[in-house]
């Protein structure tokens, strides 16, 4: 087991800077997920930790040892690739033992490690099969098994579940979570799927365009996002953003007028300095934080465009002028396209952002 | 459905007609000719005439021996060289890759007569650059075209020069289809580049290598141009005569079409048999 520390890590491809000074402290035994949209630099960051990409600047330490110039195989890490990267011409058993055999590891120890990995991942009956004879989930198990046999200090996962179907993804998510508990080692996991991040991570690192937007526990990011990007990225369905303008400040609260809702005003208590009167702001409301008429601090009228009924919950995709809102309602099966409805917003269940996306607290 | 099929066949008819006349019929016809004595007028059906002669003809066995010798030495050397060239072409360290790719492929495009003439000049006893090079490093000149072994070597060198690059390009396509992350996984497993080549690249490249080997076997079985032009009709004294050349000599100089057809079918049969053995030996385990 080992902690992983990134200090001002920079990655450049030619003149293009992809990662702009990343600072991350992954604690020993922690499960950290790097999440962000495609091209945000999360996989590049992971590959730099693995040593598969050079570091253009900064320092990476694993277990307190600087590894900038250490060969990938000597970093004490194992990596699970998105495409599994299994050796197609070898059996499962050969895939698991290949690295150990090539390095002259004693046969008995190799067999012990392979058997242990097979037992942990419940793939003992697949040992003689080739990768092409396995399902996606089984292949991913073998890929994880290949990482386990190395007995690494740190596991790195590069979008390992993206090639699996939805059901298998959920199943493998649980398996990986179980594996983390069982092995107790440090795991760094890259995904663009915020659900995976929320369900697996001890802490999430949200990346955007090569910058770290926020690091925190999943629910902390959900409840208390640092900015509009994190608020919009974490949570499914995503947070709604309503254009607003500050029309006055009233003691420890600011009063905003919703631009597309006929002058509806909301008094929003703040703990910090209020924005200037006249400033354009954005009010963030999660889909589940729309309440019945009169229950909140202000009401807005919307027209349902599409209603998705999932059984226990319904999502209503509604229009209010140019804004499209997603409203989550429990037991709202009677709503249909074209319905007019009024929903209520609570000041305490909404977030305020300035024009640049920074949070106004 | 039947109407649609009929329409499809009507569209295919011109091709099928040409295919039948100029491809299928000659194949069948030459097979039938191989059972006829064609040195008499009119030709007469004599099933054992040509095939019987084949079994006892020293010229045939000489040509067969020469062809198989070239096959056994030149094809493995060329394929090995092609693999090395493909790996070098695939290296990220290589600059001007496009230029090298063109240079390796260029010999295939060069006219056969021109390239044969150049090889004859290069290996000329008195003026050839090869003998000048040998002299410059203190080695004696070699009379390449008067002795069988050097003449055979020239043919093998020429064929290798001509086709190694072509095979390298095919192998390069195979190399580029091996996913990069397999190598990355091996790197993380502390597997050296050399071991990666032998344990990952070669096994994954096997189907392409087999494909190139089969193509080369078929090509070598038909080898004609080089012994005809470079060593002047299989010289010295038939020492480099191949089956292709024997077929030409029998068919188009002696006008013995029956015997030439029998040789042609033997060449095709051998190519198929060797290729099948090759495919069987390198088959994927189930």
Image: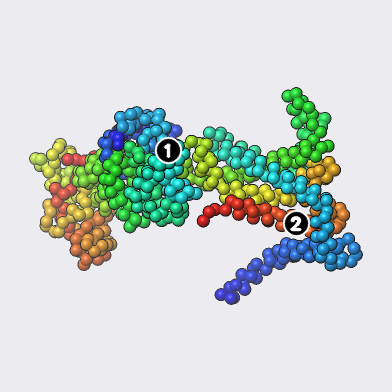
- Front-most of A161 and B114? A161
Residue at left offset 73%, top offset 47%: B68
Residue at (19% x, 40% y) in the render: A360
Check the image and report above or below for A177 versus B94. Answer: below
Is B82 or A221 nearer to us in this picture? B82
Q: Which residue is mark 1?
A: A105
In the picture shown, does residue A45 fall above or below A334? above
Image location of residue A77, percent across then percent down: 36, 37
**Residue A259, how many percent across, how many down?**
21, 50
Whole-percent x, y for residue A43 in the image: 37, 41
* View extreme (bottom): residue: B2
Residue drawn at 35 percent across, 46 percent down: A116
Q: Is residue A272 left or right of residue A217?
A: left
**Marks 2 and 1: same chain?**
no
Callout in the foreground (2, 1): 1
Tell whether B249 sits left or right of A110: right
Residue B248 visible? no
Q: CA distance from mark 2 to mark 1?
A: 53 Å
The local crowd at label 1, few if under 14, some if 14 to 19, many if 20 or more residues have their Cα within 10 Å, is few
Tell me which chain the residue with mark 1 is part of: A
Q: How many marks?
A: 2
Q: Quadrant of residue A47?
A: top left
Residue B241, percent from left and from top: 80, 46
Say which element carries label 1.
loop
Farthest residue, direction right: B41
Residue ID at (15%, 36%)? A273
* Residue linked to disc 2: B266
The reply, left or right, for residue A107 in relation to residue A328 is right
Q: Quadrant of the C terminus of chain A?
A: top left
Residue A21 lies, with reference to residue B57, above or below; the image says above
Quarter of the picture holding the N terminus of chain A = top left
To which chain does the residue with label 2 belong? B
């Amino acid at each position: 087991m080992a902690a992983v520390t990134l200090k001002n890590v920079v990655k450049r491809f030619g003149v293009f800077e992809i990662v702009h000074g990343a600072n991350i402290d992954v604690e020993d035994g922690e499960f950290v997920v790097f999440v962000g949209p495609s091209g945000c630099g999360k996989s590049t960051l992971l590959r730099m930790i693995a040593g598969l990409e050079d570091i253009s600047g900064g320092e990476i330490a694993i277990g307190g040892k600087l590894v900038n110039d250490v060969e990938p195989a000597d970093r004490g890490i194992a990596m699970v690739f998105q495409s599994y990267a299994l050796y197609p011409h070898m059996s499962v058993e050969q895939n698991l033992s290949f690295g150990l055999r090539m390095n002259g590891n004693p046969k008995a120890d190799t067999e012990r490690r392979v058997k242990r990995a097979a037992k942990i991942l419940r793939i003992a009956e697949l040992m003689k099969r080739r990768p092409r004879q396995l399902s996606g989930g089984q292949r991913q198990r073998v890929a994880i098994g290949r990482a386990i046999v190395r007995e690494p200090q740190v596991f790195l996962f590069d979008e390992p579940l993206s090639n699996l179907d939805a059901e298998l993804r959920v199943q493998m998510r649980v398996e990986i979570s179980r594996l983390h508990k069982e092995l107790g080692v440090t795991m760094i996991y890259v995904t663009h799927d915020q659900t995976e991040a929320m369900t697996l991570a001890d802490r999430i690192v949200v990346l955007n365009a090569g910058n770290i937007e926020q690091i925190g526990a999943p629910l902390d990011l959900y409840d208390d996002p640092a900015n509009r990007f994190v608020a919009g990225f974490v949570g499914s369905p995503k947070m709604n953003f309503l254009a607003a303008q500050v029309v006055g400040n009233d003691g420890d609260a600011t009063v905003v007028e919703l631009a597309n809702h006929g002058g509806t005003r909301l008094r929003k208590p703040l703990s910090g300095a209020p924005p200037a009167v006249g400033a354009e702001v954005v009010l963030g409301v999660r889909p589940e934080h729309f309440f019945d008429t009169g229950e909140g601090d202000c009401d807005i009228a919307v027209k349902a465009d599409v209603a998705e009924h999932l059984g226990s919950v319904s999502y209503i995709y509604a229009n209010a002028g140019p804004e499209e809102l997603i409203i989550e309602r429990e037991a709202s099966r009677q709503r249909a396209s074209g319905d007019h409805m009024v929903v209520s917003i609570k000041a305490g269940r909404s977030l305020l952002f300035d024009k640049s996306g920074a949070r106004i607290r | 459905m039947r109407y649609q099929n009929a329409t499809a066949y009507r569209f295919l008819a011109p091709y099928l007609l040409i295919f039948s006349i100029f491809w299928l019929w000659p194949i069948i016809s030459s097979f039938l000719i191989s059972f006829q004595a064609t040195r008499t007028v009119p030709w007469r059906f004599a099933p054992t005439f040509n095939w019987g002669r084949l079994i006892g003809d020293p010229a045939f066995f000489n040509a067969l021996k020469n062809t198989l010798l070239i096959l056994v030495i030149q094809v493995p050397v060329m394929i090995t060289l092609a693999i090395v060239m493909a790996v070098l072409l695939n290296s990220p360290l290589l600059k001007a890759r496009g230029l090298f790719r063109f240079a390796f492929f260029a010999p295939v495009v060069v006219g056969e007569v021109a390239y044969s003439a150049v090889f004859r000049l290069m290996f000329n006893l008195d003026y050839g650059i090869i003998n000048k090079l040998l002299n410059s490093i203190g080695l004696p000149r070699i009379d390449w075209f008067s002795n069988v072994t050097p003449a055979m070597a020239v043919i093998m060198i020429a064929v290798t020069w001509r086709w190694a690059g072509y095979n390298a390009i095919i192998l390069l396509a195979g190399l580029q289809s091996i996913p990069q992350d397999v190598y990355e996984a091996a790197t993380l497993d502390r597997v050296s580049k050399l071991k990666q080549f032998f344990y990952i690249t070669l096994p994954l490249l096997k189907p392409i290598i087999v494909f190139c080997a089969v193509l080369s076997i078929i090509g070598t079985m038909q080898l004609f141009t080089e012994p005809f032009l470079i060593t002047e009709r299989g010289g010295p004294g038939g020492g480099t005569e191949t089956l292709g050349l024997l077929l030409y000599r029998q068919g188009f100089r002696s006008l013995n079409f029956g015997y030439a057809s029998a040789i042609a079918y033997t060449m095709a049969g051998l190519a198929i048999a060797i290729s099948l053995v090759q495919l069987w030996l390198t088959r994927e385990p189930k």
